[in-house]
Each structure stands twice: as structure tokens, then as C-alpha cells.
Amino acid sequence: MKNQYSDKAAKTAIGRARKQKTPQDLALCVYASHLLGGVPGLVLHGGGNTSVKTKDDILYVKGSGSDLATIEPAGFPALDLEGLSELEVLDSLSDEQMMKSLRAAKLDPDALNPSVETLLHAFLPDKYVSHTHSNAVLALTNQADGAKRCQKAFGPKVAVLPYAMSGFALAKKAAEARRKNPDIEGLVFMKHGLFTFGETAKEAYDAMIRMVSLAEAALKKKRKKGFAPAKLPQKILPLAEAAPIVRGALGPGWVLDFRTSTAIKNFVNGKELRRYGAAGPVTPDHVVWTKPKPLILPAPDAKRADFSAQTDKAADRFETAYLNTYVKNNQRHNGEKIVRDAGPRVVLVPGLGLFGVGRSLRDAGIAADLAEVNVDVITAAEAIGRYRPASEAAIFDIEYWSPEAAKLGAAPAKALQGQIAVVTGGGSGIGAATAAAFADQGAAVVVLDLNATAAEAVAADIGGLGQALGLACDVTNPKDVRRAFDQACQRFGGVDIVVSNAGAAWQGEIGTVDDAVIRKSFELNFFAHQSIAQNAVRVMRAQGLGGRLLFNTSKQAVNPGADFGPYGLPKAATLFLMRQYAVDHGKDGITSNAVNADRIRSGLLTDDMIASRSKARSLSQDDYMSGNLLGEEVTAEDVAKAFVDLALSPKTTAAVITVDGGNIAAALR
């Protein structure tokens, strides 16, 4: 592994810290942390930790759940080192007492809670301490003879210790090993990871890179061939068709993050996948994100129609097995642990790859990232021996350990969390406002627009942590529409809500207007809605989770305006289309509703059109836009709220909400 420590960069970090009034020792700890956190083969998503002790008996240690790649000085709570060190003389310390002691040691009560491995950092005498879950090290430790392999690879400079659960017990064992071996540069805990230390940040970092490099070298010796492949169907179901089936089997409210590569394919296509793939995570620290085991599905045969039934059965078996394991292990805790949901967080699909599963794309992405780590470590472990992770009991104890579970966060779920929404015409106006409104409620959003740049810009604006996808789509082109829905399924796993909003206004006196104008309007304002809805129903039925169809129909659908027939006629047909979907697909749990809006500033109702229509009525533009019973202009955000309200109404279908400020002529029940 390449050593990336730079004295020049370290000096720059010190200079920046001086301006921020950050202690120099802490600045160097932050710098080294970024180097470690920037290597996925060392740590991911809040894993690992670092610390530094200062002359004034302060211990700065990584805050719980903080990411080493991006951590700043504020992410290192300052702790009373002397007070923490006094705990070392105790023979035992409960988890509750430990966490209470850690909180009491904070010099700033409002600072982050420190890492659950803080006591190890406090008990070691070294100024700087670093800890990672190096892939290479884990591939060595996760063997039946892992200790022997580690001793051979690292030599006398590293003490190799049995697995110990994070917390007080781990800290005591580390401190004892350090006292007995004053010349060592690191500690390896089996099935867990590597700790290194030094009197400078550079020494601790250099030792980490040096030991990881030794582990990598050991893995290159006497490697066996890769996984023996299983026999797969000749034709595998495409991802866009398989993903909604997988998602449906997991139940409502889950987002998927798909990954594939040559390494992943070799892994999931292996003949012994159910042995090594379901053995357990490469370190128990991952279990809060990945669950103890993945759901392993059969390869989806494109020539057979039973993949959905196979997937449902496999998901049911997974949940039963998870609950049985929970009951068995909870007996050791006198039944005190409260069961979490029994669904998987990782799904392995031979012929395709793997899915991370989460209530948000962020959580699904974390699960997928850690699943890829599992692939890398298990592949390396199997190449030199036979993969053997920590015991079922050890993994359970970490999964149900409250300090680890805290990493998942306790923020209240948003109303549409885990839902996937597609919004057409999402690059501006009502569509952009609607996309933002759904994202605000926690939905993953696919923004479709004829203008790719506009779609991508809206997605970037609303899609923190990749929660939105912007795609170019001509909704009048059936192939484009199919491609867009396929991409939505490939990215998020499926579709729950569709807002068919794209449209444009054509004018003309109905008795003289050219047929071509009417036909063009029907293509966009009617047939495009049908194409969008058909694709939505196809995906929703594959999932078996129901769904929401939402149409933007317009006041013109029920209250035609003069010379607006080319626009109003297809909108009236779309209103009927909405009701037909409600009639035909209520049996599938799919609701179908519409919003009738009027006089909304947008790409459809432009400033020029507002000027023209207000002049025709001898009104000022302001009076024209607020010409309703409430006397207020209606905005795109008002329309977006109506779409969200309908999406949150599971027992409402075939309904129309008017968002026009009040227009009796256009009122519906």
C-alpha cells in the first residue's frame, strides 16, 4: 500500500490549524485521519478511529460515527485523559457505566460522543493511535489458522490477539499486550482489525501502511485459483426487470443500490456461494449496516416466469432464519434485546451482482459499499485458505449492542422515505417544484425532462447524497420512456409514484385550427401520459407493492377556454385516462388521481402568454394571475403540495384536486 504522508501537506495542515486556533497535535491527527479515511481498503462509513494525547492530559479521539475521510477538528471531542485512565484498574465495567464515563469525560458536554473504542486509546501510552479494518489484514485474520498467519506475516513488531468485543474488554487486552511488548508497533485483533501507534502522527500512520503492506504481500503467496463457477441459465433476466421483483420481495419502503464488477460476478457466480457468501461479515463492526448474512437468490432465468415466486420464498426463508437466530442468541441476554426488522440489507444475485438495501439511497449505498468489502476480503481469504469470520454469537452481540446501533441514527422517518418517485417535465415549473417537494419528504426522485441539462440541474439541487437522478426523456417517444423507467429501476430498484406532468399548450380556434396542431398536442398531452402510465404499471405490478399514478390535467379539462381547444381536448381525455387506470388497476393496489391547476407561471404559461391572455380579458397581469375566489396567485409549489398530498392518500383514487384559488366553473367533487 502506498504511503501518502507528505511533510509539506502536514505543514499546510498545521498552518491552517493555527489560523483556526486548533492545537498542532490535533491538526496532524486530522491530517493522518484523512489519509487513512481516503482509502476504502482501510475504512468505510464511520469505521476505524484515531486519537492524540496532548501535554495537558487531554485525549482527542474520533467522535462516534464520524468519517475519517472528512473529519474536522470538531469531530474529535476533547476528553479528560486522567479520568479515563483511572478506569484501567477496574476488573469489569458494564456498557452502561462505560458510556456514562465517556460522556462524563467530555470537556465540552455538547461535543460529539467519543468512539466506543475510546478506552483503548486512553489505556495505550502512545501519543498517537490509529485503527483500521484493513481488507488485507482481515483476509489473514479470518482463517482457522489466522493467528499463525498473522504472526508469520507481521513478525515480532505486532502483537496478535484473539477477538474481543469493542469496549472495556478490548481496551484491557490491548493495554496488557502493550505493556508486555514495549517494542511493538501495532496490535492485530482477530476478526476485527489493526491498531498502530507512535509518538508522532507520521509514525503511527507509517506503521499502519507498513503492516498493511506486509499483509498484502502475504496474500500474494500461494494463491489458489478463483471460485469454481456454478452452472447458470443461458440468459439472465435484465437488471431493469429483476430489480423490481427483488425490491417487491423485501416489502414496502426499501431503496436498492446495485453493484456489479468482474470481482462481484466471480463471487456471486461461484458454486459454493451459499457457503462463503453467507458465512458472515468480515468484521462484526459492519453488521449494523449489512445484517449478519445476505439474502442469496437463485439466478434469474429470463426464460422462466418463476423468479418472482422464488424470490418471495427466499425472502421469507431469510426472515424466518434471522428471527430464529435472534431468539437463540437473545437467550444469552435474558431476552433483553429488542428485535429489529428481519429483512436483509444485502442481496446477492448470481448472474447479476449485488444489491445494498436501505430506507434511503444513503443507507443502501453504505450496505452496498460494505458488501463490496466483503467480496474483496472473502475472495482474498478463499484464495489462500478458507474464510472463517467471527462467531454467530460475536456478530449478534455487536448487532444488538446499543453503542453500535446508535450509528444508524434516530432521526424520525420522513413521510415518503423509501419511496421512489418519477416526475416528468421535472426540469422547470411545476415539475421542478414537485420533484423538490417529493425529495423534501424523503423520496428518491427521478427527474425526467426533454432538456437533459435542466433535469440534471434539478436532480443535483434536490438530491443530496445521490437521492435524485436527472435523465433526458422525450415522453412522446415510447422507447425513450421505457429507457427512462429501466434506468430508474437500475438506479433505485423500482418505482412507487409517478407524476405525469410534462405538457405544453397549443392554441387555435377549434373550427379552423390545423389538424397537425391538434395531433401534436395529443401526442404530448394525452398519448405521452398513457405511455408513462403503462410503464409505471408494468413496474408496479412486478413489485407487487401497489403504487401512485398522478396526472397533471389542468382546469381546461373541465372548463374550456376560448381558442384553447388544442390544449383542452387532450387534457380532457387525460382526465378520463386517469379514471380508467383507477378502474382497471385498483385491484393491483394502484391509485390514480389528478391535479387540475390553473394559471401557474411556468414554461407552459410563459410571461408572453400571461401578457396575451390578460390583455384579452382587459386585466392587469397581476389581476389575471390572482383572478380566483381567493384573490391570490397560485404557485408551482402549491401544485406540488397537492401531488404530495395525493401520494400520501392510500384510500383515495379516481379523484381530482383543483389547485386554482377557486374557480366554480372548474370545480369538481
Image (cartoon, rainbow, N blue to C red):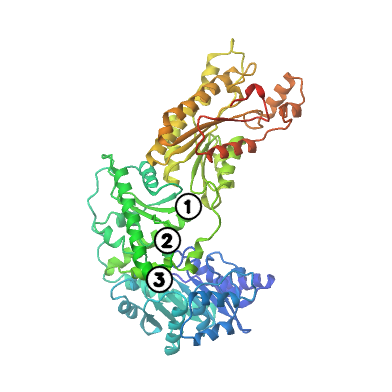
Tell whether 424 sits left or right of 298: right
Q: Amino acid at mark 1?
A: Arg
Q: State the image quarter where residue 158 is shown.
A: bottom left
Tell whether 317 sits left or right of 170: left
Q: Nearer the viewer, residue 545 or 346?
A: 545
Mark pair 1, 2: CA separation: 18 Å
Task: Kindly identify which residue carries mark 1.
Answer: 359
Q: Earlier in the sequence, mark 1 or mark 3?
A: 3
Mark pair 3, 2: CA separation: 12 Å
Q: Earlier in the sequence, mark 3 or mark 2?
A: 3
Q: Is residue 572 visible?
A: yes
Circle 2 — which element? loop
Q: Amino acid at mark 2?
A: Val
Circle 1 — which element? loop
Rendered image: mark on residue 159: none
Q: Earlier in the sequence, mark 1 or mark 2?
A: 2
Q: Give coordinates of residue 220: x percent, y percent.
A: 31, 69
Q: Outermost residue, front direction?
A: 334
Q: Give coordinates of residue 190: x percent, y percent.
A: 37, 75
Q: Outermost residue, top direction?
A: 511
Mark pair 1, 3: CA separation: 28 Å
Q: Give coordinates of residue 68: x percent, y percent.
A: 52, 67
Rendered image: mark on residue 333: 3
Tell whether 451 sits left or right of 188: right
Which is more foreground, mark 1 or mark 3?
3
Which is more foreground, mark 1 or mark 2?
2
Task: Kindly identify which residue carries mark 2.
Answer: 339
Circle 3 — which element? helix
Residue that appears at 52% across and 77% down: 97
Q: Quadrant of the N terminus?
A: bottom left
